[in-house]
Image (cartoon, helix red, strand yellow):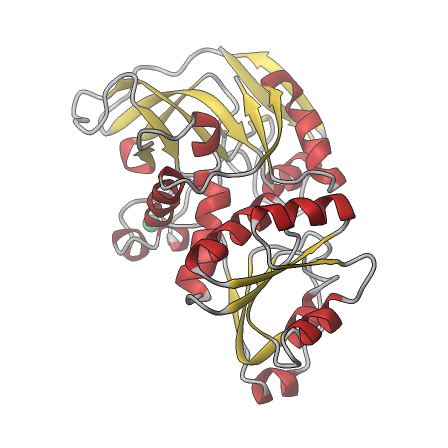
Amino acid sequence: MRALTLVADRRLELIDVSPPPLPGAGEVQIRVKVVALNHIDLWGFRGMAFAKRKLPLVVGVEAAGEIAAAGTDVATFKAGDRVVMYGALTCGACKACREGRDNLCESIGGIMGFHVDGFARDLVNLPARLVMPIPSGIALRDAACAPIAFATVEHMLFDNARLEPGETILVHAGGSGIGTAAIQMAKHLGCTVITTVGSDEKAAKAKALGADHVINYRDERFEHVVRKITGKKGVDVVFEHVGADTFPGSLLSLKRGGRLVTCGSTSGPTTSLNLMQLFQQQYRIFGSFGASMRNIRDALAKMQAGLCPVIDTEVELKDLERGLERLQSRQAFGKITVNF
Ligand SMILES: [Zn+2]
């Protein structure tokens, strides 16, 4: 079977490997059909100095497929069922796992495609508890964007920032995979959405997606425009993942008592923080990483209700690297998916 394998930093090879054994107790075997790309794939591809991992490594953290076989004791899945998979090997036994806070697992085995072999291969065995059925009516390609992109946004907006109907939110990088999801989810809830993009072409697409106000951050200082739009009050919530380039402006865009939630730092990981501003303005800042199985279920339910991910590009498995280049170029509007 095929496995797209990172053999050295920035070197991917489609190699032939032996298929996994029949699924053991509590396991299912999945035939992977679609992988969706995320920034963590890009970090993994380029290499990170402090990541504890060994190459070669099969890439891919977010995927959908079909059950090929189920362990004899697994009654919840049968061959042919369409499924998505959790993007990390949680232990299933620690306090966080038992309480459904999967992304806070105290004994995590690693992130798929980053620390341990991922989903860019024809067959994979996984514990059935990390696999979730796809409701009817959702295309596999769309479902493949649920476990990381949509579920991460669910976790950020609803578990962490506690976004409420009628609130105003600033969504950074509205053309990114998670940015497009955040715009849709916030509009779906009944919020006013302000978003930033880097081109007029993306501005038109963000408007079409439902954003109320779109700021081209190359033309204008977004924090000034946000204060103008909100009558100097600021927004209730900022959805951050850009990092160094935007973080100080993001804090200036918040109203008193506002919430900032961040899951990324694509423009750089460090920033300075004015502590007087932090406590006087009573900001609440949430770090968010990954999602729970419940977030994935909720994301799939939203997809079933018609909230579909925006797909920018589809590539074939052998061309995954071209998909990563597209992601890195910041030209994409929406998700990049990889078909098998
Ligand atoms: Zn655990």
Examine the image and state in which quarter residue 81 appears. top left
Name the residue nearer the viewer: 326 or 182.
Answer: 182
Place of residue 65 in the rendered image (x, y in percent of width and height, measured from the top left): 40, 23
Horizontal side, residue 17 vs residue 299: left or right: right
Q: Is residue 160 above or below residue 174?
A: below
Residue appearing at x 51%, y 50% in the figure? 184
Horizontal side, residue 79 vs residue 111: left or right: left
Q: Is residue 285 above or below residue 204?
A: below
Q: Is residue 122 above or below residue 259?
A: above
The furthest residue to the right: 219
Name the residue nearer the viewer: 273 or 33.
Answer: 33
Place of residue 229 in the rendered image (x, y in percent of width and height, measured from the top left): 66, 72
Place of residue 239 in the rendered image (x, y in percent of width and height, measured from the top left): 57, 61
Name the residue nearer the viewer: 113 or 172.
Answer: 172
Horizontal side, residue 50 vs residue 66: left or right: right
Residue appearing at x 49%, y 56% in the figure? 187
